[in-house]
Amino acid sequence: MSWTSILGLPDFDLPILRGWYRHRGLLNAAFFYYIWVGMIVKEVKYCNNYILELTFTNNKVKRLNFIKFLITSDNPCTTKYRDIELFKQFEIIHGTLSWNNEMDFSSESLYNWNDNAVAIKISKSQLKQFGITV
């Protein structure tokens, strides 16, 4: 039985954490492990339009809408993911949500994502461009 299971923490192994454990005390490692690992993306499901459902290692589930981000972005590496078929080609790489290593979101930024933080109005014509009907 591992000490993480004794403390009720999820069993999650990252090489960076293993090295960290060796150089710090048990309590510091457990605190770091709980805080940092609690927000790592473990599963992503495509819902509809540009909405993804993310499950984190602490079992918190969030539905994130990427439409505002994609509409306001001018970066060509990002704007190409306005194509819904390309948008659906995401993967999780070491807890990071990634689209072909061109557009990446860390677990921390996804965990703290707030759809209302960007106060922009999206017109019906902009949504129509993306094939979304209101």
Image: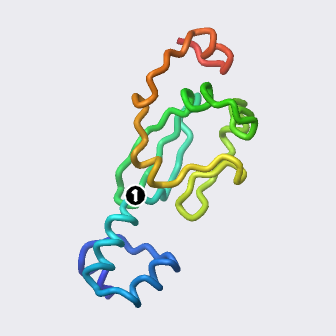
Residue 115 placed where, x, y %?
43, 32
Identify the image quadrant of residue 114.
top left
Q: Which colour scheme is used?
A: rainbow
- Vertical order, 131 against 93 (above or below): above
**How many numbered marks have been drawn onto this rendered protein structure?**
1
**Residue density around tag 1, few if under 14, some if 14–19, many if 20 or more, within 10 Å:** many
Residue receiving disc 1:
39
Q: Is 77 displayed left or right of 41 in the figure? A: right
Q: Is 102 displayed left or right of 46 in the figure? A: right
Residue nearer the viewer, 51 or 66: 66
Q: Which residue is drawn at 25% across and 81% down?
A: 27
- Vertical order, 43 against 125 (above or below): below
Q: Is 26 displayed left or right of 109 in the figure? A: left
- Vertical order, 115 against 105 (above or below): above
Q: Which residue is drawn at 34% across and 86% down?
A: 24
Q: In the current view of this chain or complex, which residue is farthest to the bottom?
A: 22
Q: Residue at x 40, y 58 (%)?
A: 39
Quadrant of image for the N terminus: bottom left
- Vertical order, 116 against 19 (above or below): above
Residue 121 placed where, x, y %?
49, 15
Q: Is mark 1 on a helix, strand or loop?
A: loop
Give, as a three-letter code, the residue at label 1. Met
Residue nearer the viewer, 128 or 103: 103
Residue 128 placed where, x, y %?
64, 13
Q: Which residue is drawn at 46% across and 47% down?
A: 110
Identify the image quadrant of residue 25.
bottom left
Identify the image quadrant of residue 6.
bottom left
Residue 42 placed where, x, y %?
48, 59
Q: Is 69 displayed left or right of 13 in the figure? A: right
